[in-house]
Image: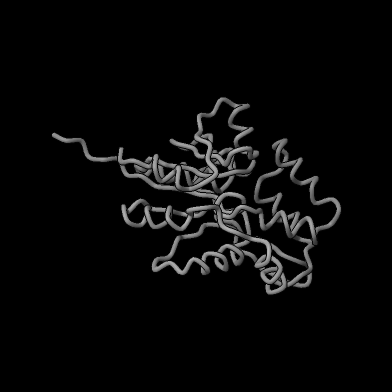
Amino acid sequence: MTPKPMKRIVLIDFDGTIILQDSALYILEHFGTQNWRKYDDQLLKGEISLEECLSNQFSSINITKDEMLSILDKEISFRPNFNNFSLYCNQFQIPLIIVSAGLDFIIEHFLSKLKLEYRIPVISGITEYNSKGFSFTFPELKHESSKNFKDDLVHYYQIQGYYVYYIGDGSGDFYAAQRADIVYAVKNSELENMCNENDINFRPFLDFKSIIQSLLPL
């Protein structure tokens, strides 16, 4: 009897992965307080969670959503062939889900520019804006052992019987990459360095065309 093909799913980061720039980093560099970088250091040391890091950093941002999007429209571009990659996943019924610690309204804004006939699901923090800046509500963890919600989602889908591909670029992707079945890391990224330092097998890439070519049926 021919074995049943394993279910596959792709979980993918947004900032620095789907788009070439890091939209959250751009906003923090131009509009954040002077001490926002200390939270990145605390995240790398494991002193705070990914969710705590982002909430602390954006609590001081005092420009509106519309102002932010207007600024980013001049700065943001997609990584080559992401549109083709999403079409490929849709054609072969491989679920593609964006998992991002970035700002949900920024992600949806730029995805709308692709004018796809289908919606790519996004799992991220839900942002709220008021006079005190931005606040976030992140997905609740399904597993107590999970390091953050990205790691938690990889764990969740593996339990559901999926073979999980994870694609990312930053330190916030590390624990998810550590757990995933196959990892693609942007070349010369922080995630690539962390994978090398921790002996995690990964495939480097700069263009989604190379992932399409390697995403063959199991």
Rendered location of residue 172, percent (x, y)? 62, 44
On the rendered image, what quadrant is the C terminus found in? Answer: top left
Left or right relative to 8: residue 16: right
On the rendered image, what quadrant is the N terminus found in? Answer: top left
How are the residues colored? one colour
The tally of labels here is 0
Rendered location of residue 10, percent (x, y)? 43, 47
Q: Residue at x 69, y 57 (%)?
A: 24
Left or right relative to 203: residue 132: right
Which quadrant holds residue 46?
top right
Q: Is residue 89 above or below residue 190?
A: below
Q: Residue at x 54, y 29 (%)?
A: 200
Left or right relative to 107: residue 135: right
Which quadrant holds residue 43?
top right
Rendered location of residue 146, percent (x, y)? 55, 41
Towards the viewer: 6 or 187: 187
User: In this view, which residue lies farthest toward the bottom?
Assistant: 66
Rendered location of residue 189, percent (x, y)? 63, 40
Towards the viewer: 80 or 107: 80
User: In this view, which residue lies farthest toward the left?
Assistant: 1
Q: Residue at x 84, y 50 (%)?
A: 35
